[in-house]
């Protein structure tokens, strides 16, 4: 035994390395058949796999320039991180963007900015920026709702996000006076921490389904009655990253908690089909919306990514003749995010936000319906200048998903679909989410929303307006091509927005339907 140990200890370190490399080479050539590269190039072939694995991180941190990454470049991410931490989010020395590039937008500033007086709501609170329209007012719903913030958290379910992330977002919207969209996974206890909630469901009817997976009005009414912080209901028709794509929630991911919240069975695969079972055509969908609004008293809207317009045309005609229909329409852009989607869907199915929204808005405007609908936009709009463009085009509120995730620590690792999210935001791993400090992160989300609103108000004032709803298409220019470097939005997208009735910021502040914590100050 001693002789053997003496022999082992006499082998020098470089001999050990040669032995290990020789063993790896034997394994590569003779013992594995899966990887041709390792077989043909034993040992060194492994470097290719290592570099492929760490390539995204190398590019993100070392190689990519400030403006070239997608979905969000370093400057955009940095602005969200700094805003969320209330750090210096300015840049020095002027823009580093090529402002002559295609699709670059310019906001036309006024000769003299809008002046706020001493007692103006924004002199008191520089971040006060509620929605200029009341959701559900036109259709005389029993409980209309004016979102107290023009920026809100977009649909992301508990399941795609961790419990701690959902709780941070809900506590954050409570501080910021915004609303929190539940996403498709039902209403979890993490959505019930004080913030206004928009309850969202898709074809799986999670949280409001019967034992056969069909929609249950009884369960929805119960949910609304038990949770007065639910202010509106959103029916998902599609989302930009995967329109018309059904999905399977694997039984292995269905814990007792998820089963309880979603009203599904533990450990059994659950199907979310591409189509709704509660309606199968546009007239039936309108009846469904009315039935829900009638039973719950809440405003009801639909969320969709835009492509073909024929069924939207049918919807507009029904709304015109019947005098009712959705209270709001959330338009998601093809650039929208998701927990998981096939690349060919995410890259190619449905229009980018500006094209989809302008097509849809024009259609409803032509039918004289744009005033009675609250338009919500989502698709990388969580930056004040992008939001100004969206408001000029006709939106009344924006929803943000990935920007909200970044404000609570997401590093754009782009592995939401693997359950290995390193920041603990998009994973169910208890270990990975244990690093999230909910109190700190909720303040970060709130601060991002507040900074966004403050800068958005300042841009609005710079353009000579009191509220962003006053932006017109002609206030924003967009670079269209080399020949004709820039055109106003109305000339680019061929419509002018219908003016939003707006008296003053004070009038919005006094509104009895105003959400968030402001409502307590008014009663
Ligand atoms: C992790 C994650 C989960 C999502 N879950 C849903 C969902 O349940 N229902 C839905 O309609 N959209 C869902 N979305 C899409 C977002 O709500 C939003 O429409 C889209 O990401 C565009 O907004 P953004 O550019 O601000 O991220 C999800 C997005 C992400 C990133």
Image (tube, rainbow, N blue to C red):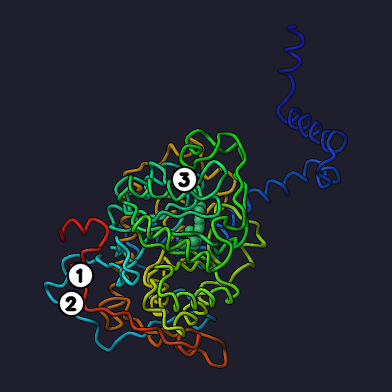
Q: What residue do we see at 38% from left, 82% from top?
A: 107
Vertical arrangement, residue 85 with respect to residue 34, above or below: below
The residue sitting at 29% across, 52% down in the picture is 174
Disc 1, SS: helix
Compute the Cα span from label 3 to label 2: 46 Å
Q: Quadrant of residue 456?
A: bottom left
Indicate left or right for 97 with 449 as reference: right
Residue identified by numbered label 1: 122
State which quarter of the image contains the N terminus: top right
Task: Answer with mark 3 or mark 1, whichever residue precedes in sequence.
Answer: 1
Q: Residue at 18% of width from left, 69% of height from top?
A: 121
Question: Do residues under tags 1 and 2 come within 8 Å of each other at their CB atoms?
Answer: yes
Residue that carries the numbered disc 3 in the rendered image: 207
Image coordinates for residue 257, horizontal then vertical, percent:
47, 35
Query: Foreground residue, 442 or 57?
Result: 442
Which badge, 3 or 2, comes first in the chain's sequence? 2
For mark 2, give the secondary structure: loop
> Residue 60, percent across and down?
55, 57
* Crowd band around label 3 with a 10 angstrom C-alpha radius: few (<14), some (14–19), many (20+): many
Q: Is the C-beta of the residue carrying label 2 under 8 Å from the nearest atom of ligand 1?
A: no
Residue 187 visible in this rendered orientation of the protein: yes
Q: Nearer the viewer, residue 366 or 14?
A: 366
> Mark 3 or mark 1: which is in front?
3
In which quadrant of the rendered view does residue 153 lie?
Answer: bottom left
Residue that numbered label 2 is attached to: 116
Dot 2 crowding, Cα within 10 Å, few <14, some 14–19, many 20+: few
Q: Quadrant of residue 30?
A: top right
């Amino acid at each position: 035994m001693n002789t053997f140990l003496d022999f082992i200890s006499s082998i020098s370190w470089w001999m050990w390395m040669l032995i290990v490399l020789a063993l790896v080479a034997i394994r590569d050539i003779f013992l594995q058949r899966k990887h041709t590269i390792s077989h043909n190039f034993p040992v060194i072939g492994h470097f290719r796999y290592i570099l492929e694995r760490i390539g995204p991180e190398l590019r993100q941190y070392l190689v990519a320039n400030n403006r070239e990454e997608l979905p969000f470049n370093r400057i955009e991410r940095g602005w969200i991180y700094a805003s969320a931490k209330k750090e210096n989010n300015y840049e020095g020395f002027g823009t580093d963007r090529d402002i002559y590039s295609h699709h670059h937008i310019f906001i036309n500033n006024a000769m003299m900015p809008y002046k706020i007086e001493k007692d103006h709501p924004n002199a008191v609170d520089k971040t006060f920026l509620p929605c200029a329209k009341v959701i559900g007012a036109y259709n005389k719903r029993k409980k209309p709702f004016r979102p107290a913030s023009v920026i809100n958290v977009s649909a992301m379910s508990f399941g795609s996000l961790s419990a701690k992330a959902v709780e941070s977002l809900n506590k954050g919207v409570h501080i910021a006076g915004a609303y929190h969209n539940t996403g498709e996974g039902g209403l979890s206890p993490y959505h019930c921490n004080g913030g206004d909630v928009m309850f969202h469901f898709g074809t799986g009817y999670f949280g409001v389904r019967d034992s056969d997976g069909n929609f249950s009005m009884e369960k929805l009414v119960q949910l609304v009655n038990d949770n007065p912080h639910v202010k509106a209901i959103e029916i998902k028709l599609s989302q930009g990253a995967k329109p018309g794509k059904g999905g399977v929630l694997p039984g292995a991911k269905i814990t007792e908690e998820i089963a309880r919240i979603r009203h599904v069975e533990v450990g059994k695969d659950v199907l979310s089909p591409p189509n709704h079972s509660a309606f199968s055509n546009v007239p039936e969908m309108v009846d469904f919306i009315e039935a829900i609004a009638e039973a719950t008293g809440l405003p009801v809207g639909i969320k969709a990514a835009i492509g073909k317009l024929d069924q939207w045309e049918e919807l507009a005609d029904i709304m015109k003749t019947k005098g009712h229909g959705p209270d709001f329409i959330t338009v998601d852009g093809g650039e929208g995010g998701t927990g998981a989607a096939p690349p060919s869907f995410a890259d190619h199915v449905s229009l980018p936000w500006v094209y989809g929204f302008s097509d849809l808005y024009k259609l409803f405007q032509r039918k004289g319906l744009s005033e009675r609908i609250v338009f919500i936009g989502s698709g990388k709009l969580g930056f004040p200048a992008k939001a100004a463009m969206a408001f000029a085009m006709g939106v009344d509120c924006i929803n943000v998903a990935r920007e909200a995730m970044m404000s609570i620590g997401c590093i754009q690792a782009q592995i939401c679909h693997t359950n290995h999210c390193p920041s603990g935001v998009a994973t169910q791993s208890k270990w990975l989410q244990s690093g999230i400090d909910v109190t700190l992160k909720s303040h970060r989300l709130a601060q991002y929303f507040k900074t966004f609103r403050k800068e958005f108000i300042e841009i609005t004032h710079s353009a000579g307006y009191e509220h962003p709803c006053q932006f017109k298409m002609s206030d924003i220019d967009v670079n269209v091509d080399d020949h004709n470097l820039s055109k106003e939005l109305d000339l680019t997208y061929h419509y002018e927005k219908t003016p939003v009735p707006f008296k003053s910021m004070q009038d919005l502040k006094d509104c009895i339907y105003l959400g968030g914590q402001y409502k307590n100050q008014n009663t």
